């Protein structure tokens, strides 16, 4: 069995996911292909993953490295599973462009990797690389299952499914940490393993529709306690619950830029009131770069670490496909009526069954109207971004930006066109859109 990891220079995902693989019996005797375009990062990962293989897996796996575009097809050859964690354009220049140019127009962002003008451009430049990768997969490993962790998750996964027949699922960890953190926030002393809950929606904006403990509905107690929480960093998320009735899976810093209510030049006090961390993603990128530089001076055992299983789904999915053991988890799959009041073309985050047949979405039912409306606003931005990436259409790109809630709330339609044109010029070959 071969597992290919694209973007193996990742500082977090490669260790978490392959650490889980080394601790999953059915996956231990495997060949792992680590692929990256950065040779220095790749060598670091090879050393760390090699050491983890010895410590966690008695050296049973065979780990190989592949560097550069010319070796990508070889890395993909005969793969059974492909894990995607690439970042196209990196912090410099791409992420800086995504933040600095919009800021000159007065359009501020927090994360800029899922929706908003940053998410749109990140999606286009990532998809244009992913289209090349899935074409190579069609030739080298047509039956492989692609596990996509790359943001903007809905745009990238949806674009892959629109362009290729490669089996693909989008994976995130916001669902599995949602309920434990909510109970922790509100001080409800119940083991999360004893709680029954239902979540459905779209990635980073899925909704906690039900939460029960021994047939007791916990929502009234959660909402009552939420009123007394006072100042805390996730205040905006609780305000969304207060106004729209349901708790959302992703953090306040993400949700601040998915809707038009929070980051507004005309209401600067909202930034302080809701503790909205503007330019948060560039700050995290700089911090990760510093940590990576500092870590290089540590010994290999320290960098490999000792670890239990992470909360990521990838190893469990591979185990179920290999062994046929059924699992229930949340994945991002094409809607096709699974949430009837969202577009059939939407990528939805819903409960899924995993077995030898792969990842299959389970019918989730209609969302509350207000939740579906917020999701739909994001879905149509995602669909237009996918169209722009597939066709190279500048008009489709403009329309994606016109439809984006935060962008449209801050800028005029002519300003949006000017902003997109300036960002296209700055991104150059990373965003190949027809003039």
Image: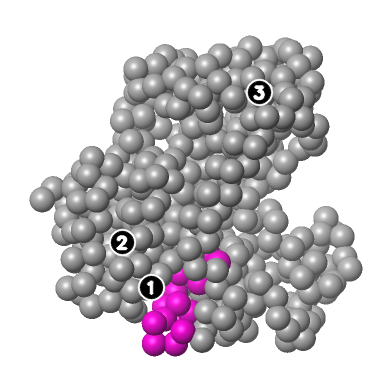
**Residue pointed to by mark 3:** 49
Q: Nearer the viewer, mark 1 or mark 2?
A: 2
The front one of 77 and 325 is 77
**Residue pointed to by mark 2:** 101
* Range covered by the magenta-colored residues: 253-268
Helix, strand, or loop for circle 1?
helix
Q: Which class describes the residues within 10 Å of circle 2: few (<14), some (14-19), or many (20+)?
A: some
Residue 318: percent from left, percent from top: 62, 30
- Give me the residue at 67% from left, 18% from top: 50
Say whether residue 145 is left or right of residue 222.
left
Residue 414: percent from left, percent from top: 17, 73
Q: Which mark is residue 114?
A: none
Q: Which class describes the residues within 10 Å of circle 3: few (<14), some (14-19), or many (20+)?
A: many
Say whether residue 181 is left or right of residue 136.
right
- Give me the residue at 31% from left, 68% from top: 104
**Residue pointed to by mark 1:** 406
The front one of 35 and 105 is 105
Q: CA gap, disc 1 to disc 3?
A: 41 Å
**202 above or below 153?**
below
Sequence-first tag of 1 and 2: 2
- Give me the residue at 44% from left, 51% from top: 152
Type of secondary structure dominating the magenta stretch? loop
Helix, strand, or loop for circle 3?
helix
Sequence-first tag of 1 and 3: 3
> Do the residues under discs 2 and 3 have CB atoms within 8 angstroms?
no
């Amino acid at each position: 069995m071969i597992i290919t990891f694209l973007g193996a220079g990742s500082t977090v995902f490669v260790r978490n996911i392959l650490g889980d693989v080394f601790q999953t019996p059915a996956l231990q005797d495997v060949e792992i292909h680590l692929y990256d375009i950065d040779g220095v990062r790749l060598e670091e990962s090879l050393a760390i993953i090699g050491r983890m293989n010895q410590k966690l897996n008695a050296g049973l796996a065979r780990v190989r490295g592949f560097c550069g575009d010319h070796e990508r097809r070889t890395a993909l050859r005969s793969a059974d599973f492909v894990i995607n964690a690439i970042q196209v354009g990196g912090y410099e220049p791409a992420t800086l462009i995504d933040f600095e140019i919009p800021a000159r127009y007065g359009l501020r962002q927090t994360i800029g990797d899922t929706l908003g003008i940053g998410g749109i451009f990140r999606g286009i430049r990532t998809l244009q690389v992913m289209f090349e990768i899935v074409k190579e997969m069609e030739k080298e490993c047509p039956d492989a299952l692609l596990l996509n962790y790359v943001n903007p998750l809905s745009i990238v996964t949806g674009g892959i499914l629109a362009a290729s027949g490669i089996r693909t699922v989008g994976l995130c960890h916001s669902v599995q940490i949602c309920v434990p953190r909510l109970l922790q926030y509100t001080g409800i002393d119940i083991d999360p393993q004893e709680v029954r809950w239902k979540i459905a929606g779209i990635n980073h904006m899925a909704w906690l529709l039900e939460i029960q403990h021994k047939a007791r509905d916990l929502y009234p107690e959660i909402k009552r306690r939420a009123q007394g929480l006072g100042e805390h960093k996730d205040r905006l998320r609780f305000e969304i619950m207060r106004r729209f009735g349901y708790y959302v899976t992703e953090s306040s810093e993400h949700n601040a830029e998915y809707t038009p209510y929070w980051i507004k030049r005309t209401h600067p006090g909202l930034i302080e009131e809701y503790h909205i961390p503007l330019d948060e993603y560039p700050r995290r990128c700089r911090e990760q770069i510093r940590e990576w530089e500092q870590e290089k001076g540590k010994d290999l055992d320290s960098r490999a670490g000792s670890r239990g299983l992470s909360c990521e789904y990838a190893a469990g999915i591979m185990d179920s496909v290999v062994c046929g053991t059924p699992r229930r988890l949340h994945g991002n799959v094409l809607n096709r009526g699974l949430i009837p009041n969202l577009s059939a073309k939407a990528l939805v985050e819903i409960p899924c069954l995993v077995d030898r047949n792969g990842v299959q979405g389970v019918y989730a039912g209609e969302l509350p109207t207000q939740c579906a409306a917020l999701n739909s606003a994001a879905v149509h931005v995602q669909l237009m971004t996918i169209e722009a990436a597939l066709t190279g259409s500048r008009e489709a790109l403009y329309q994606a930006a016109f439809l984006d809630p935060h962008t449209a709330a801050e800028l005029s339609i002519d300003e949006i066109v000017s902003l997109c044109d300036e960002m296209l010029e700055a991104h150059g070959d990373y965003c190949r859109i027809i003039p």
